Image (cartoon, helix red, strand yellow):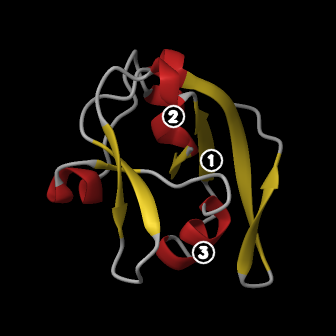
Amino acid sequence: MCKILPAESWRRAGDVVPWSEDDERDGFMHLSTLEQVLDTARRHFPGRRDLVALEIDEGAIADPVIYERSRSGALFPHLYGSLPRSAVIRVTGLAWTDGGYSFVSCDT
């Protein structure tokens, strides 16, 4: 599963990945499966050029991850707790081109 966030937020993160304003509002960290992450980025962050996707080892998270239905009916992982930096196994850049995102290597 993955967390989408600005590259600067990842660079500044300490031992715990920060929650976004949307996460704070909703009371859980919004995550996506690997299969969902590009579409999630397109829907919620159109045109942004500063995003990364953090690939997460679910087994390295102590707090509960619950798969819940979105308004569209799709199941998405939601983390009710902290995401330790040590659970992040890969950081991939997201490039906006032609109305969508693709994965690219990044320097963070």
Instruction: Give, as a three-letter code, the residue at label 3.
Output: Arg
Does label 2 or label 3 sit earlier along the sequence? 2
Q: Amino acid at mark 2?
A: Trp
* Number of marks in picture: 3
Q: Are marks 2 and 1 in contact (CB under 8 Å)?
A: yes
Residue behind mark 2: 10
The residue that label 1 is drawn on is: 52
**Badge 3: how crowded within 10 Å, few (<14), some, or many (20+)?**
some
Nearer the camera: disc 2 or disc 3: 3
- Name the spot of residue 7 as percent of width and height, x first: 57, 43
Where is residue 99? Give x, y as percent.
72, 84
In three-dimensional space, the C-alpha distance between marks 3 and 1, rounded to whole angstroms, equals 13 Å
Q: Quadrant of residue 98?
A: bottom right
Q: Secondary structure at mark 3?
A: helix
| Disc 3: which residue | 42
Q: Residue at x 35, y 69 (%)?
A: 69
Q: Position of residue 49 (x, y in %)?
A: 65, 62
Q: Residue at x 45, y 28 (%)?
A: 12
* Residue under the point 59% across and 39% down: 54
Amino acid, disc 1: Val
Q: Secondary structure at mark 2?
A: helix
| Residue 2 % position (x, y) | 56, 45
Determine the residue positioned at 19% across, 58% down: 26
SS for dot 1: strand
* Rendered-image quadrant of the C terminus: top right
Query: Marks 2 and 3, Cα distance to the nearest angstrom?
Result: 19 Å
For the residue pair 55 and 92, the one nearer the viewer reads as 55
User: On the rendered structure, is 48 left or right of 77?
Assistant: right
